[in-house]
Amino acid sequence: MNGKTIGANYNFWKIWHRWFSQIYPDGSLVKATNDNKVYLIRNGQKRWITSYATLVTRYDPDYIIPIDPSELADYEEGPEIKFPLYALAET
């Protein structure tokens, strides 16, 4: 196999993923079909919502999109969302 074949395959892969990969917009709530963790997609990162109380005070759980675990793995891990809305926290 020569270098041109490898380059062509890589270019095909890049084009394929650019056009056919699923990209969820900012604000999407997603969870992998094999896991109960819910994530918020924000700035190309997945942010784990650590508790149900945090989820329901900030977002509507009816909008959670179940996705394939491989799609979720494509997102970089962002900071966790730990506190419910209007929670008092001491720093």
Image (spheres, rainbow, N blue to C red):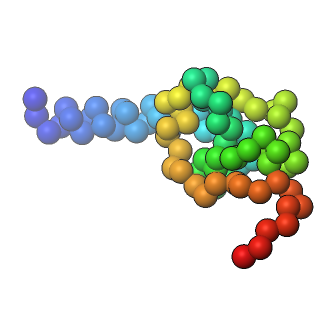
Which of the two residues, 53 or 77, is positioned nearer the viewer here?
53
Specify the farthest residue to the front: 90
Whole-percent x, y for residue 47 in the image: 64, 50
Residue at (57, 23) in percent of width and height:
34
On the question of residue 2 being in view, the answer is yes
The N terminus sits in image quarter: top left
Which of the two residues, 19 or 71, is positioned nearer the viewer here?
71
On the question of residue 59 being in view, the answer is no
Where 60 falls versus 54 (above or below)? Answer: above
Q: Would you say 89 lies left or right of 19 here?
A: right
Specify the farthest residue to the left: 1
Specify the farthest residue to the bottom: 91
Whole-percent x, y for residue 7 in the image: 24, 39
The C terminus sits in image quarter: bottom right
Whole-percent x, y for residue 89 in the image: 79, 68
* Total marks placed: 0
Whole-percent x, y for residue 3 in the image: 14, 39
Residue at (53, 29) in percent of width and height:
69
Residue at (37, 33) in percent of width and height:
13
Which of the two residues, 15 or 56, is positioned nearer the viewer here?
56
Q: Would you say 38 lies left or right of 7 here?
A: right
Q: Would you say 85 lies left or right of 73 here?
A: right
